[in-house]
Amino acid sequence: MAQRNRGFARSTLEVMHPDAAGIDGGGSMHFVAVRCDVSEQPVRQFGCFTDQLHAIADWLHECGVTIVAMESTGVYWIPLYEVLERRGFEVLLVNARHVKGVPGRKSDVLDCQWLQQLLMFGLLRGAFRPADRVCEWRSLSRQRARILRDQARYIQHMQKAMVQMNIQLGTVISDVAGVTGLKIVRAIVAGERDPSVLAAYRDCRIKATEEQIARSLQGNWRIEHLFALKQALNAFDFCAAQITECDEHIERTMQQLHAHPGPSEPAKKPSRAKHTPKFDLRVQLFKICGVDLTRIDGINVTTAMTVLSEIGPDLSRFPTEKHFTSWLGLCPGTKISGGKSLGSATKRSVNRATQALKLAAASLRASRSSLGAYYRRMCARMDKPKAVTATAHKLARYIYLMLTKGEQYVDRGQKYYEDQYRERVVRHLHKRAAQLGMQLVPCATTQ
């Protein structure tokens, strides 16, 4: 047996971070573990009050700890993370699934001790977290998105109340929350019941005539449904006021992130997004990152703000574009066993930047750009969800190159992409014909 194992050397784990600590965070208690030889009580329990969080930092300083690992479960880790980061510790926010996937854990070891041991041997990697100012921008952007979802829900409540009164306004105009729709709804809540008077609020851009609108406004006007309509309208207006206030905070936060002068050229195409902030968002984004991401087809100012608020302008944490697309969950999977590929599906991701890029990719279905041609070719080769993911992957690569290289995006058009694709196909056909001992002869084109 000794002869058989003579050529193999037993590998041992090296201590990478002897000054490591592990923290198991919770809603009311935090468990902190350090090395057994630096404290008589290597595992301690602390509360979640602010003074107790500072007590954790003081004890870690006494134990000579410089690097800390903690799980990213819920939102309980955020206050402690911020306190430790301000106190000078290197904090690694690790995925709970990755920690549980490491074999060798014993049942009598606490979570905090397990985190400390893994970090001490260099088996943990911290998750990506942008700069503190970018985190502030990200929180405000997420708050704005939540308010927009709430506002959309109240629009549905208004539509439901009108349908219950047989007010078929939504069948003759496309947007009940538009200029004409809101004027009519406000007049109904104010007490107006005459269909002809309500139809007179019609905007000149509405395709339906005043007679058609008047016919749709003949209902039963029940009191309970009018009350529901009034409350839904008040909630809609409250959300609109909150969005305006949120936009003001976002603008001030973005101004603190300025690192470049404004753009010297006008926008490629004006933004027509309905829920775009009132300030010049394109100029603010350009001053933050130094490039105009809206020049990429499919990416408007709202999508660019969502992506940049999630990742920030500094992508130095990602060595290559492959690392960046892998973090977004847009690259193919590598499930391989025994040299055989068992699947290449992308992993499920709830990343808001990923979702925004997929929506941008889906909007390229009728684009006459090179990206539009690429998306339609992908749809011809595979099902639509995979084509959307492939196109979003390409958008992410363009964004990475623009943010890291500082280069502007230039679209060469659909014809350039199709000609380039045709040359590539013809080149492969010539190579295949030569392998079969044949020659590819082009047909003469007829005029």
Image: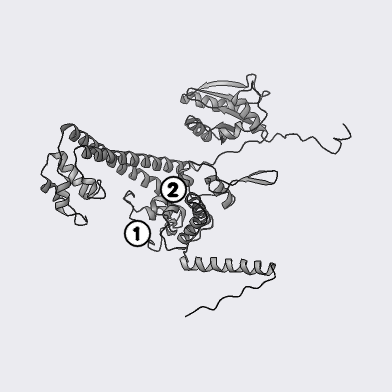
Badge 1: how crowded within 10 Å, few (<14), some, or many (20+)? few
Badge 2: how crowded within 10 Å, few (<14), some, or many (20+)? some
Tell which of 297 and 165 is nearer to you: 165
Q: Is residue 136 left or right of residue 126?
A: left
Q: Is residue 8 visible?
A: yes
Q: Position of residue 369 (x, y in %)?
A: 44, 63
> Most extreme residue toward the right, as rendered?
3
Q: Position of residue 307 (x, y in %)?
A: 45, 48
Circle 2 residue: 356
> What residue is at 58 percent from the left and 25 percent from the top?
32
Report the mark closest to the observer, 1 or 2.
2
Q: Amino acid at mark 1?
A: Pro
Marker disc for residue 426? none
- Up-down: is 410 above or below 309? below
> What residue is at 65 percent from the left and 19 percent from the top?
40
Circle 1 residue: 270
- Up-down: is 127 above or below 386? above
Asked which secondary structure carries label 1, the reply is: loop
Tell which of 83 and 400 is nearer to you: 400
Tell which of 184 and 234 is nearer to you: 184
Asked which secondary structure carries label 2, the reply is: helix
Q: Is residue 180 left or right of residue 420?
A: left
Q: Is residue 197 left or right of residue 148?
A: left
Q: Amino acid at mark 2?
A: Ala
- Up-down: is 378 above or below 318? below
Q: Is residue 64 visible?
A: no
Display coloring? one colour
Q: CA distance from mark 1 to mark 2?
A: 19 Å
Mark 1 / mark 2, whichever is N-terminal: 1
Q: Position of residue 360 (x, y in %)?
A: 43, 52
Residue contact between numbered discs 1 and 2, judged by CB atoms under 8 Å: no
